[in-house]
Image (cartoon, rainbow, N blue to C red):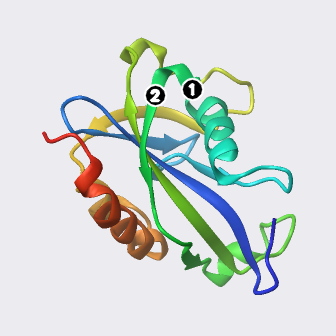
């Protein structure tokens, strides 16, 4: 769904374990890491989209997680121009709702290769703030805002 301002509706997922670490995933075939995220379809609420993306990207079901909270409002970022031509549907950026989830399963439940069209090829648990220094620059402000909004709900390390 793209709004009248050119922003695609999207959800972001911060999955945390009992040690306060978060799941950090490497995009398939690239040296680029990020939190799981994906678009919201026209018939979906952000929460429904989040659960769909959770399964599609890292193989987890709703029973594997507990929703701890979500960000208020939409957090936006603009895509650099070099990415505009790669989009099937042109949009200038993404507006996101971020969810903080507590992982209830075992590490073996995480399957980034569950589907043929996989988004990620590797994942690891990292410290809560680590992604801020590693994510691509144009997403950094949104990551910072999401992590700050959700920190009070996260398990302590």
* Label 1 Cα crowd, 10 Å radius (few <14 / some 14-19 / many 20+): some
Image quadrant where one finds the C terminus: top left
Residue shown at the point (44%, 71%) measured from the top left: 142
Quarter of the image for the N terminus: give it: bottom right
Residue position marked by numbered label 2 in the rendering: 65
Q: Residue 28: which disc?
A: none
Q: Which residue is mark 1?
A: 62
- Residue 127, how many percent across, how many down? 21, 45
Of 131 and 16, nearer the camera is: 16
Name the residue nearer the viewer: 128 or 137.
128
- Closest to the observer, 70 or 138: 70
Label 1 secondary element? helix
Residue 70 seen in render: yes
Residue 13 sits above or below residue 135 on the image: above
CB atoms at circles 2 and 1 under 8 Å apart? yes
Q: Residue at x 45, y 41 (%)?
A: 25
């Amino acid at each position: 769904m793209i709004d009248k301002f050119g922003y695609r509706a999207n959800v972001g997922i911060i999955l945390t374990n009992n040690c306060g670490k978060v799941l950090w995933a490497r995009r398939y075939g690239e040296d680029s890491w990020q939190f799981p995220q994906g678009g919201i379809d026209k018939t979906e609420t952000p929460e429904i989209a989040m659960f769909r993306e959770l399964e599609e990207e890292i193989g987890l079901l709703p029973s594997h997680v507990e929703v701890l909270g979500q960000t208020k409002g939409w957090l936006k970022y603009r895509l650099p121009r070099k990415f505009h031509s790669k989009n099937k549907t042109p949009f200038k950026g993404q507006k996101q709702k971020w969810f903080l989830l507590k992982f209830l399963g075992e590490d073996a439940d995480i399957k980034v290769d569950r589907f043929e069209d996989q988004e990620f090829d590797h994942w690891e648990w990292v410290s809560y703030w680590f992604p801020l220094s590693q994510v691509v620059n144009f997403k950094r402000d949104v990551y910072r805002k999401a992590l700050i909004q959700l920190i009070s709900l996260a398990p302590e390390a």
